[in-house]
Structure formats: C-alpha cells, structure tokens
Amino acid sequence: MDYLEFYRLKEQPFSIAVDNRFYYNSSQHSEALIRLRYAADTQKGLAVLVGDVGTGKTTLARRLLDELDERYFHAALLVVLHASVTAEWLVRKIAMQLGVEKPADDKTELLSQLCQRLIELHDQKKKAVVLIDEAQMLSNKALMEELRGILNIEVDNQKLLTFVLFGLAELDNCLALDGPLRQRVAIRYELTSFTQATTEDYIRYRLQIAGATRELFNTQAMATVFEYSHGVPRLINTICDNALLEGFLRKKEQLETDLIRDVAFDLKLSQSVGA
C-alpha cells in the first residue's frame, strides 16, 4: 500500500511536473493569461512575465501555448537551458521553431529565411508567437540586440512576430542591456506568491482533481503549509506531497499542524516572517 491507496486518491495531487489538468486558475494567473493573450492577439511584439522561482511561470507558458489556437497562430515554446547560448544559436532555434526548413549556416542567410517564413505565415493569416521560458538566461547584450533586430521585421507597419518572455526578475536587467528593446516591452506582468486563502484553495483544488472525497488537511494544517511555503506553489506542492507520505507512514487519516511542521523541518524550510 502507498499513500495514494491509503488516502483513496487516483493519482499524486502535488507533483511538481507541469500538468494542465492540475492548472489552478488563480486571479493573478488568470489576469496574466489575459494580458499575454492580448499581446499575442494584437501582435504587440514583446511581452514579459516575471516572477520568483516556483511561482508558476513555466505553467503559464505551457497554458498560453495550449490556448493559442492553431487555426490562427503559429506558436512555439523555446526553453533556454543555460546562459552560454549565442546569438546565432538563438536565431537558429527561433527559425526552426517557426518552421524554417534546412536553416542556413550563414547568419545573414538564416535571417533572410526567417523573414521569408514570417511573411509566409502572415500571408496565411497566421500570427507568429515565440514563447521563451527561462529568458533571464539570455544575459548578454548581443542576444538582446538580436531579439530587437528580429522584432524589426514588419509588413505594412505590422509586426510579424511576437515574443513572450518568461523569467526571473533578472530578466528586467537583461532587457536593460539594450535600451531600445526595453522600450519595446508592450506588456509586462509580475507573478507574486499566493495569499493564505489562495494557498488553502489551491491545496483543496489539487486534491479534488486527484480524486479526494474528503478534507485530508485540516484548516490549521493548510495555514501551516502557507507559513512554510510563503505561498510559493512549488513549495506548497513539495510540502503537501511529503506530508501525505508522512501521514501514510504514521497512519493519519487527516493531516494536522504538528505533522506539517515536522515535514518542514526535514525539508529545512523556515516560516514566513511574522508567522
């Protein structure tokens, strides 16, 4: 027997893997999506979403990608894995994501191919959108200048490509490396941590999706999760997943404050200031 069987759950409710079935549409996530969709719909050119680690940026990137209807958009998601990428690598990846076949080795020719592809999409009445996750990794001036250059591709004063950048707060510093690019940010939104009330609703929501038919965390236990997670969704998931495992090991039908505190201690987490 594992904790799923013990608590009569169909699946793990607090996995940190991105799964749209567990997407929790908080008020700020809903507002962020509305703003970012608006940027894509109206071809604003450049939109930015920033937030601390674990606040749900990648979840929003995947959600936005899913919501951009393929009949009207050619959308792609690019994840930057390290900070040593070059401008040539970035242009090649963008070109490939947008459907450029056999990207040229020569950068000038590659940019010409990209321009032609964007014009093709425009002629097909499709809006090109590239979402870039972990965009704070693009931390040098040459990369920012390259993005600005691509944004200059227009037809009849209409931008042919919209970038939506997702990253940590350092992303603002990256954009500042190129003043003209920074001025082109048409939409900017910042994710913050959940409130206590939202944290409790989030916990209940994910448990419900996983098949829970009763309250597995009492009210004070959820308040304690908030104290140690600081309202950060990723930490909420980690604490709750460990709490369910610990509750199973202790054969606790309902999880209480002391158990949450023990789990937080094992995870080396500290309480919120003033808790």
Image (cartoon, rainbow, N blue to C red):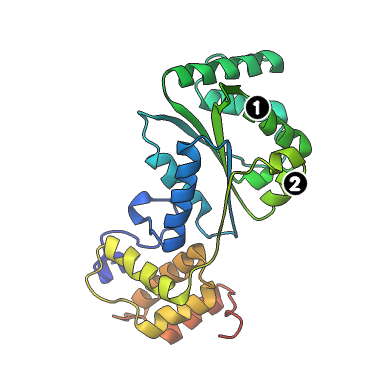
Q: Which mark is residue 182?
A: none
> What residue is disc 1 on?
152
Q: What amino acid is found at the position of numbered circle 2 in the picture?
A: Ala
Judged from this view, the residue extending furthest toward the front is 156
As rendered, which of 9 and 133 lies closer to the eye?
Answer: 133
Q: How many discs appear?
A: 2
Q: Is residue 69 left or right of residue 167?
A: left
State the SS at label 1: loop
Q: What amino acid is found at the position of numbered circle 1 in the picture?
A: Asn
Q: In which quarter of the image is the C terminus?
A: bottom right
State the SS at label 2: helix
Q: Earlier in the sequence, mark 2 or mark 1?
A: 1
Residue 199, quarter of the rendered image: bottom left
Residue drawn at x 76%, y 33% is 142
Q: Nearer the viewer, mark 2 or mark 1?
A: 1
Q: Quadrant of the N terminus?
A: bottom left
Residue 260 x/y as whole percent: 45, 80
Residue 53 x/y as whole percent: 59, 59
> What residue is disc 2 on?
176
